[in-house]
Image: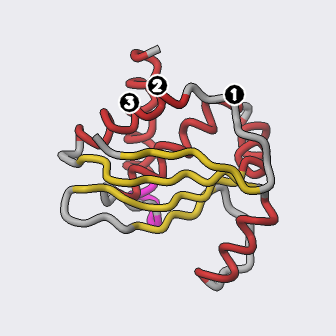
Amino acid sequence: MGVISFNTEGVAMPAIDAAAVRKWIERVASTYGRTVGEVNYIFCSDERILEVNREFLHHDYYTDHIGFDYSVDNILSGDLFLSLDTIRSNAEQLGEDYSRELHRVIIHGILHLVGLKDKTPEEEVLMRRAEDRALTLLCRNR
């Protein structure tokens, strides 16, 4: 069993059921033939994610997540920064429940670690379908 940690930088810890989310992440990873090594979630503010984006990716914009992939073979590992500010804004703009949007972004990072992309319109459709399938698994486990 891997190590999945939830940390914060400058924000309060969001209300998630950490044990259930860990099991969910492991279950989703296993559907792709992967196991979880060490995955660190860092919940942060817009300002922090902008700093990370500028420093490491040389991008000058806000985003809901940034992932650093350290996976080897079929073992998923990485650092996943999630901006709670942008996630909340996106949920409001989409008319989506904040908790559902938060969980979508949580699993989005894992889906990137398993190799899914979302740069092209076709890849984006596949990513959204994978997120929806994963969210269905989460709902079944609750």
Provide the residue designation for mark 3: 23
Query: Do tag 2 and tag 1 residues touch (Cβ < 8 Å)?
Result: no
Question: Which mark sits nearer the N-terminus, 2 or 1?
Answer: 2
Residue 97, label in figure: 1
Q: CA distance from mark 3 to mark 2?
A: 5 Å
The kind of secondary structure element at disc 3 is: helix
Q: In the image, is residue 10 part of the stretch drawn in magenta?
A: no
Q: Nearer the viewer, mark 3 or mark 1?
A: 3
The rendered magenta stretch, by its main secondary structure, is classed as helix
Q: Amino acid at mark 2?
A: Ala
Name the residue at 25% across, 56% down: 75
Read off the magenta span: 119-124
Give the position of the N terminus as an image quadrant: top left
Identify the residue shown where x is 53% and y is 31%.
18
Residue 15's disc number:
none
Residue at x 43% of width, y 61% of height: 78
Q: Height in image: 106 above or below 115?
A: above
Badge 3 vs badge 2, beta-carbon distance below 8 Å: yes
| Residue holding disc 2 | 20
Task: Give the residue type that dot 1 points to.
Answer: Asp
- State the SS at label 2: helix
**Disc 3 and disc 1 in contact, CB within 8 angstroms:** no
Q: Up-down: is 98 above or below 75?
A: above
> What kind of residue is marked 3?
Lys
How many marks the image carries: the answer is: 3
Please state which of residues 139 and 81 is positioned toward the viewer in this rendering.
81
Q: Which residue is at the front of the view, 116 or 119? A: 116
Residue at the image position 40 percent from the left and 40 percent from the top: 129
* Left or right: residue 40 compared with residue 89: left
